[in-house]
Image (cartoon, rainbow, N blue to C red):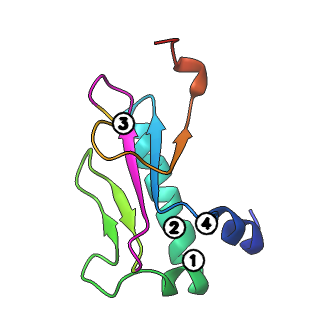
Amino acid sequence: MKNNQRRQTYHIGARQYLHSAHEQPTAEMHFARLRSLIEQSDELLEAMPRTQNGGFHTANGKERIETADGRRIVFKTRTKKAGRGPSPDAIVIDEAMELDSR
């Protein structure tokens, strides 16, 4: 992915994202990949808060990335309770073939 593609993907206007994966290891892998992409980009790093964790929350099953201006992407697995609570502006679904019609 080129740097300009990363910026276009990142700046689509949503403030709250939910990234849904079928299994926890997949959600963790996507969190790590996005973190790595951010850390490799000076422009994206500028958007991150100057805090101890740098906006990267790594508690098992509660992974999320928060920018300094409050944008957030939360990484969840698809369970009966996942996704309950505040509604995200955008949802990213990995492994959509595993979704049922419910």
Q: Which residue is mark 3?
A: 24
- Type of residue at label 1? Gln
Q: Nearer the viewer, residue 92 or 54?
A: 92
Q: Quadrant of residue 54?
A: bottom left
Mark nearer the N terminus (2 vs 3): 3
> In the image, is 59 to the left or to the right of 20?
left
> In the image, is 6 to the left or to the right of 13?
right
Q: CA distance from mark 1 to mark 3?
A: 24 Å
State the residue at coordinates (27%, 42%). Answer: 85
Q: CA distance from mark 3 to mark 4?
A: 23 Å
The quadrant in which the N terminus is found is bottom right
Q: Which residue is mark 2?
A: 36
- Type of residue at label 2? Ser
**Cβ–Cβ below 8 Å for labels 1 and 4?**
no
> In the image, is 57 to the left or to the right of 41?
left
User: Which mark is nearer the camera, 3 or 4?
Assistant: 4
Marker disc for residue 10:
4
Residue 80 in the image, given as x and y percentages of width and height = 30, 22
Label 4: which secondary element: helix
State the residue at coordinates (35%, 58%). Answer: 64
The quadrant in which the C terminus is found is top left
Q: Which residue is mark 1?
A: 40
- Type of residue at label 3? Gln
- Give the magenta part as a residue range: 69-81
Q: Say whether residue 90 is magenta.
A: no
